[in-house]
Image: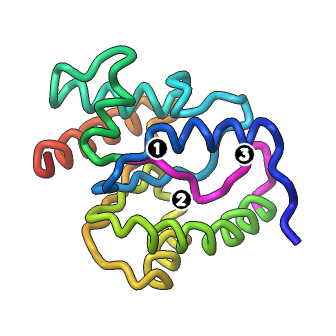
Amino acid sequence: MRKPKSNATAARERLRRRYRPVRVRALFIGEAPPASGRFFYQADSGLYRAIRDSFANVFGTLRGDNFLDSFRALGCYLVDLCGKPVDRLGNAARRRARRRGEARLTETIRRFRPEIIVLVIRAISPNVRRAEERAKWSGRHIELSYPGRWYRHRVAFLRTLARFLRQTF
């Protein structure tokens, strides 16, 4: 039996669906929504700012409130491996949560059949690879260094994502 979603989880998923493109060309995959309550689709997370800044550096006109609409218009969509925050879990519990998220991600990949999968954090690579295999998906797979608190990771994230955007769109 499935557990009912919390109000916060349900609200996050409604907001996420609002920005789902008709055709998902590039499926961005994160680990989980942060425990802080911030969220990419609320336009208030560090990941949101890093992705928005990369798009703005390449396209120039995707700034401000319009970014999420532009992200969707380009066929981009961000989902998470885990449905609930994991950033305050211990290592073993976090690994278990990631493994549990693989089945849901497999179904997401099957449903959307994206041309490209973009991981925004390398730590989930084995989980995403297993989900891709189970979904019988093949395509372009890109892994980014999470842009978190380390300057060099943010620079690598921005540089790699910008290169991907220039080659793809």
Dot 3: what SS? loop
Say which label, 2 or 1, has the lower sequence index: 2
167 over 71 or under it: above or below:
below
Residue placed under numbered mark 2 in the picture: 123
Question: Which is more foreground, mark 3 or mark 1?
Answer: 3
Q: Position of residue 166 (x, y in %)?
A: 12, 43
State the extent of the magenta-drawn residues as a range.
Answer: 77-91
The mark lying in front, picked from 3 and 2, is: 3
Whichever of labels 3 and 1 marks the residue nearer the N terminus, that label is 3
Residue position marked by numbered label 3 in the rendering:
85
Q: Is residue 85 magenta?
A: yes
Q: Residue at x 88, y 72 (%)?
A: 1
User: Toward the viewer: 168 or 127?
Assistant: 168
**Of helix, strand and loop, which one carries label 1?**
loop
> Where's residue 5, x and y in %?
80, 50
What percent of the width, then of the height, locates residue 100?
Answer: 71, 70
Residue 48 located within the stretch drawn in magenta: no
Find disc 1 in the rendering and name its residue.
146
Question: Horizontally, is 143 left or right of 110 in the view?
Answer: left
Contact, mark 3 vs mark 1 (Cβ under 8 Å) = no
Characterize the local packing of mark 2: few (<14), some (14-19) or many (20 or more) Cα atoms within 10 angstroms: some
Label 1 sits on what residue type? Tyr
Tell me how far mark 3 sits from mark 1, CA to CA: 16 Å
Which residue type does callout 3 highlight? Pro
Q: In which quarter of the view is residue 2 placed?
A: bottom right
Circle nearer the N terminus (3, 2): 3
The type of residue carrying mark 2 is: Ala
Q: Are marks 3 and 2 in contact (CB under 8 Å)?
A: no
